[in-house]
Image (tube, rainbow, N blue to C red):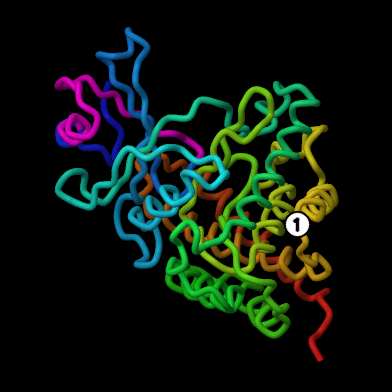
């Protein structure tokens, strides 16, 4: 079997043998996990050991080709997951981090393979019993509230980022990255930025913000519990209500390219149920959550524009598909329009 793009088998085999031992030449099998739109994620299987119970891991590396300077930081992502190991938030165990570009062309880290189910689409969701879907939604909100309640100093993440002015920082970051990554005119993005920048709510304390928290970024157990929270690339410190709003925004089919999201299947929480459930597990004031939802749509539009640009440029490990590129491109326009409409309905700050 040919190895996927972004993998140097011989050098990685030596690296794995140094980390876990018992790796023979040509025994590792690497498979690109589909679904990712940013960093490249692979399952790694020890072919020699598979007959005796097997060993599996997960490897994460940046996209191929040019990436923005502030994005795809493997060292930072590794640090966050390692810090949360004993926090009560389920994360994969870490195997190792490699910062030597000579090994695989870019920094990467390897973590334990966590068994379970990733519910990425409606077909997968429909195979899950309704009662389990409900428990999944409950567990997702409970784990999110638990993450937001973590003392950042207790887990050694105080210096992960600035702690105040989260929304201001995010508006600046994503407007800058949008301008750097886009190669076309997308109506509404800059106009929405101006509205959001003029109506920022007061931040309620400081917490760990996952940055992309949703059903398909978590590994779920068959019983409906979160087995591991994945994809920490956008994690930072700041206003945790952005995570709640992100969960709500991802119940909209616009965020899944016009196809119904898995959470649209009966049994999963609606947007109102997400808000109510989070309110039961957190003492934060949700009065201005509509602002954060408008911000979530805008930020997703900026992120997807970067993904669209990378796919159109052909730097996503041979995952490019002309139909997918077109869908991503159109999705940005639709998200930008909804973000602008949502922001325009917000009350003005006097």
Question: In the figure, 211 relative to 143: above or below?
Answer: below
Q: Which residues are magenta?
A: 13-35
> Residue 345 sits in which quadrant?
bottom right
Residue 102 position within the rendered picture, expressed as x and y whole percent measured from the top left: 14, 48
Tell me which residue sits at (75%, 70%) in the image.
291
Residue 240 position within the rendered picture, expressed as x and y whole percent measured from the top left: 64, 63
Residue that sits furthest to the front in the current view: 154
- Which residue does the numbered mark 1 point to in the structure image? 282
Whether residue 24 is in magenta: the answer is yes
Question: In the figure, 246 relative to 179: above or below?
Answer: above
Relative to 268, 13 lies left or right:
left
Residue 184 position within the rendered picture, expressed as x and y whole percent measured from the top left: 50, 69
Tell me which residue sits at (56%, 60%) in the image.
151
Q: Nearer the viewer, residue 278 or 120?
A: 278
Relative to 319, 144 lies left or right:
right
Whether residue 68 is in magenta: the answer is no
Relative to 222, 59 lies left or right:
left
In the structure shown, which secondary structural element does the residue marked by tag 1 occupy? Answer: loop
Name the image quarter holding the C terminus.
Answer: bottom right
Name the image quarter holding the N terminus.
Answer: top left
């Amino acid at each position: 079997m040919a190895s996927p793009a972004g993998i140097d088998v011989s050098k990685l085999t030596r690296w794995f043998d140094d980390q876990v031992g018992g790796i023979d030449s040509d025994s590792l099998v690497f498979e690109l996990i589909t679904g990712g739109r940013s960093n490249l994620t692979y399952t790694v299987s020890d072919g020699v050991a598979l007959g005796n119970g097997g060993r599996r891991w997960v490897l994460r590396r940046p996209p191929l080709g040019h990436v923005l300077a502030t994005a795809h930081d493997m060292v930072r992502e590794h640090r966050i997951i390692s810090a949360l190991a004993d926090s009560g938030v389920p994360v994969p165990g870490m195997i190792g981090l490699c910062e030597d570009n000579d090994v695989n062309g870019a920094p990467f880290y390897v973590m334990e393979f966590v068994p379970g189910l990733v519910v990425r689409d409606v077909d997968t969701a429909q195979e899950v019993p309704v009662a389990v879907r409900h428990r999944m939604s409950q567990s997702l909100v409970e784990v999110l509230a638990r993450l937001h309640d973590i003392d950042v100093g207790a887990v050694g993440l105080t210096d992960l980022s600035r702690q105040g002015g989260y929304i201001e920082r995010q508006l600046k970051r994503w407007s800058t990255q949008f301008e750097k990554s886009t190669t076309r005119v997308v109506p509404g993005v800059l106009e929405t930025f101006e509205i959001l920048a003029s109506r920022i709510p007061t931040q309620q304390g400081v917490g760990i913000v996952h940055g992309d928290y949703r059903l398909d970024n978590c590994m779920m157990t068959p019983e409906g519990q979160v087995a591991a929270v994945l994809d920490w690339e956008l994690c930072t410190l700041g206003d945790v209500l952005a995570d709640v709003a992100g969960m709500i925004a991802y119940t909209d089919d616009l965020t899944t390219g016009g196809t119904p999201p898995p959470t649209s299947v009966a049994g999963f929480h609606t947007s109102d149920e997400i808000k109510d459930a989070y309110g039961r597990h957190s003492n934060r004031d949700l009065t201005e959550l509509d602002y954060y939802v408008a911000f979530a749509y805008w930020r997703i539009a900026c992120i997807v524009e970067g993904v669209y640009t990378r796919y159109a440029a052909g730097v996503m490990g041979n995952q490019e598909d002309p139909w997918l590129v077109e869908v991503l491109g159109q999705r940005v326009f639709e998200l930008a329009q909804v973000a602008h409409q949502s922001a325009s309905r917000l009350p003005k700050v006097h």
